[in-house]
Image (cartoon, rainbow, N blue to C red):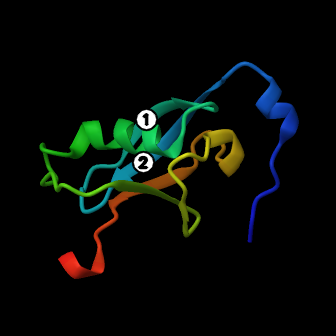
Amino acid sequence: MSTPVDNEAQDRAPEVVPLNAIFWTDFVQILVPVTTADTMDQVAAAVASHSEGRRVRALPYPKVVIHDGRTLPGDMTVAEAGIAPLDHVTVDYLIPEEAS
């Protein structure tokens, strides 16, 4: 199911959206501030910066954001995804099947 795009939100200046986030197998959930204009690639990087190489082993694969069971495209913005303040997101690696 796709979330309707809020065109009015896209016309406004970016707003801060604090997210509850966890990186893959990390055991620490963190509060990460992002903006409505940030892409999922930027959100994934922001979340990963707190865990990857610290409590989670860094892997050479792209990262994806998962919100409400949906894996979101890297170029989708927070506003387009319909992510609200304090929503929970998970960041995981996109590991190709041949690498598993």
The answer to whether marks 2 and 1 mark residues whose Cβ atoms lie closer than 8 Å is yes
Q: Quadrant of the C terminus?
A: bottom left
Residue 100 visible: no
The local secondary structure at tag 2 comes to: strand
Query: What amino acid type is highlighted by mark number 1?
Result: Val
Give me the residue at 80% from left, 33% from top: 9
The one nearer the camera, 12 or 25, is 12
**Residue 79 circle label:** none
Please tell me how crowded label 2 is: few (under 14), some (14-19), or many (20+) other residues with Cα within 10 Å.
Answer: many
Q: Give the answer, above or below, for where 42 lies relative to 69.
A: above
On the picture, is 99 further left or further right than 24?
left
Q: Quadrant of the N terminus?
A: bottom right
The local secondary structure at tag 1 comes to: strand
In the current view of this chain or complex, which residue is farthest to the top? 13
The quarter of the picture where residue 30 lies is: top left
Residue 31 position within the rendered picture, expressed as x and y whole percent measured from the top left: 42, 37
Residue 52 position within the rendered picture, expressed as x and y whole percent measured from the top left: 20, 46
Q: Which residue is mark 2?
A: 21
Q: Which residue is mark 1?
A: 32
In the current view of this chain or complex, which residue is farthest to the right? 8
Give me the residue at 23% from left, 81% from top: 98
On the picture, is 13 further left or further right than 48?
right
Give me the residue at 44% from left, 37% from top: 42
